[in-house]
Image (cartoon, grey):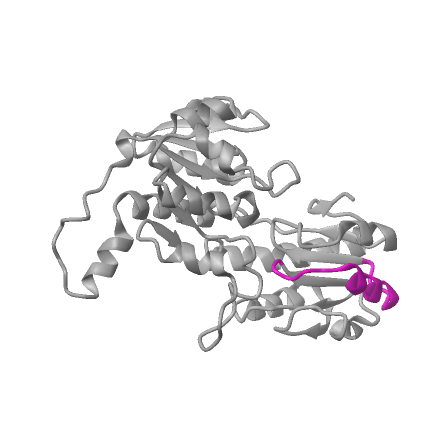
Amino acid sequence: MKFAFFGLWEEERPVLKGLCEKYGFEISYATGEVLTVENAENCEGCDGVSVLGKTFITAPIIEKLHACGVKYLATRSIGYNHIDLAALKKYGIRLCNSQYPPDSVAEFTLMLMLMSIRKYKQAHWLQQVNDYALTYLRGEVLARKTVGVMGGGKIGKRVMQLLSGFGSRILCHSADRDEEVEKLATYVDAETLYRESDIITFHVPLLPSTRHMVNAETLKKMKDGVVIINTARGELFDVQALIQGIESKKIGALAMDVFEGEEGIYHEDRTDDILTNRDMAYLRQFPNVVLTQHMAFYTQLSMECMIENSVEGLIGFTTEGKTRLEIVL
């Protein structure tokens, strides 16, 4: 078994070394660089390739992998919308993803809720100029809020479990029903969730049906002063509608760990560069907007699980012809 690894984080390297010793596979290539058409030649003779979840795997890259004899691709992420699935299917390369416990993202989501309703950003800014007055800092409490959770999967359910300890009224809209969720929340349609929720948090995958699901029309259905949280995918939100919602005060607070067009900015050191995502820069300056750099997942627990799952998937493909983590194309 011979595998190549791209986009390796430093935290992943010792875990990968231990996995190599445990399972006895050969590491043909291991780099912190992302996979490109140019460096794909390093995959020659490899059974499988593991890539970082933020890397766009385009048709030309997949064609080059196929030419190198690669049969399997593993993405160290839950989502796989960064990969050209049609090209994978065309060249017969099988795909698996990674999973990690929902705690990292769920806890981060709760943190963003609390930061938003307790006006942490404003307090932090004021301290920088030695203003310790409470004039602008009156907050709210979760116990008095109705929280709507869009998506009742693993992360959405964990968010609801955490919220239940605060005494919030919880609404959930999900494509699937879950007995555990029914004990925590009331299932409602999307219209009801938008209409009755003080806080709405999104935990759905990026699909054609969910792209820009928060837009000018859906915002009209929400309460005035609604608090909106996104730790899922930036493309779920229409940024222009968000800007209008903030400027009109329809949105009371906005907290996002993801942003449409974040590629090339988040997870990069751009200290001395000019950033060209004007919408990101404009939204960031509002006192009631919190933007973090796609870091909700970034814990030791998640990093270990992602590299372990990636290796597990590739080994399953190579030795047994299957893996529980396969994405069927």
Among all residues in the image, which is located at the extreme bottom?
272
Residue found 48% across the figure and 75% down from its top: 273
Relative to 226, say whether 196 is above or below: above
Q: Position of residue 234 (x, y in %)?
A: 53, 49
The stretch drawn in magenta includes residue 222: no
Residue found 29% across the figure and 54% down from its top: 121
Q: Position of residue 262 (x, y in %)?
A: 54, 59
Question: Left or right: where does residue 49 sit relative to residue 145?
Answer: right
Quadrant of residue 148 in the image? top left
Q: Which residues are magenta?
A: 53-71
Q: Position of residue 15 (x, y in %)?
A: 57, 66
Quadrant of residue 141 in the image? top left
Question: Left or right: where does residue 10 sit relative to residue 19?
Answer: left
Relative to 102, say whether 304 is above or below: below
Query: In terms of depth relative to the viewer, which is nearer, 18 or 199?
Result: 199
Residue found 86% across the figure and 65% down from its top: 69
Question: Left or right: where does residue 48 sit relative to residue 205?
Answer: right
Q: Position of residue 87 (x, y in %)?
A: 81, 54
